[in-house]
Amino acid sequence: MDENEFYTSYLIDYPSDGLTITGVMQIPAGDGPFPVIIMNHGFYVRSIYNTGDGTDRASAFLARQGYITLASDYRSWGESDVAESFFYSGLVIDVINLIHAIPSIPEADSARIGMWGHSMGGGVTMKVLTVLGGRVVPNDSEERIETTIKAAVLYSSVSADDADIINRWGMGCFGDIAAGEQVFGCNSADVVPAQLPLNLQTAYHTTASDIERLKSVAAIYHLDYVTAPIQIHYGTEDGQIYSGTPPEWSIKLTQELRNAGKQADLYQYDGEGHSFIGEPWFEYMRRVLQFFDENVKNNSAS
């Protein structure tokens, strides 16, 4: 896609549960192996989304500092195949399979991986952390294993409580994706195709309508599985428009992480909205870089 003195950008694709998922990768100039940051983008209307949207600014910044960056389009975005995704689960699967593909990159150090997520991508990041941290050893004992993710950054993230997301944007849109994106009151981040068996559509609707059932899929109720330190950033003016994420979601998650004994650093940016601009963005990215340098680049323990 592009080549400069700092890094080279490539279009990529990889397999994910029978689907082909597309995305973009930046590889720094010089000799590897390089640490890797998985970049999880926020929600975009699919008809206007282009590969790299939502991650390109931060990816370029990190690639200049010696990180390979990998941004999945997720299923149904970009040139990826389309398939169902309930409560972000399909997107989580696609990101986990991207992590599994990292060893195929000769320049990558698979023992040093971080994750970054903006908005919807923050919600995906939290679910990846709980799913990977919740794996058990092959003998099916209850012993948990440490996730491969050394550190994670959440930037203007959606809530880690799915009930908050549904209360704000509604449950997933049933049927045609493009049509669903034009409907006010349904959350087209979830994909519920019309051709799915009716009992599966009913099961989704039943769970999305039940606060207690939603706890089984919400990361905030499974934080004991999280092993990576987390850095959280939000703007005080976020959430004032419908597509934004209220600051209280970041504050709520930080408190619950700390209650669970996890490392969670929270940063507030006065006057900033859903995407920071000007000096506040550079201030935020300097904190991100220092955090990743300490926990990913300089953490070579597997």
Image (cartoon, rainbow, N blue to C red):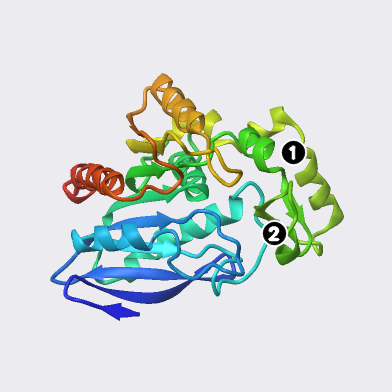
Q: Quadrant of residue 17?
A: bottom right
Q: Is residue 12 above or below residue 228?
A: below
Q: Residue at x 55, y 29 (%)?
A: 221
Compared with 176, 286 (above or below) is: above
Residue at the location (39% across, 56% down)?
39
Give residue 181's mark.
Answer: 2
Label 1 SS: helix
Mark earlier in primary sequence (1, 2): 2
Q: In the displayed structure, would residue 277 be above or below residue 252? A: below
Three-letter code for the amino acid on which mark 1 is drawn: Thr
Residue lying farthest to the left in this orientation: 31
**How far apart are the two marked residues, 1 and 2, measured between alpha carbons?**
21 Å
From where the camera sits, is residue 109 visible?
no
Q: Please, which residue is most extreme toward the top here?
A: 259
Which amino acid, mark 2? Glu
Viewer-proximal residue among 201 and 231: 231
Q: Residue at x 60, y 56 (%)?
A: 90
Residue labelled with disc 1: 207
Q: Is residue 108 visible?
A: yes
Q: Which SS class for mark 2?
A: loop
The crowding category of the residue bearing disc 1, from other C-alpha atoms within 10 Å (few below 14, some 14 to 19, many at least 20), is: some
Choose top left, top right, bottom left or bottom right for residue 205.
Answer: top right
Percent coordinates x, y for residue 172 in the rendering: 71, 50
> In the picture provided, is 89 more to the left or to the right than 224?
right
Q: Look at the numbered discs 1 and 2 and tell me whether their residues touch, using CB distance below 8 Å.
A: no
The x and y percentages for residue 128 are: 47, 46
In the image, residue 98 lies at what x, y percent? 44, 62
Q: Which mark is residue 3?
A: none
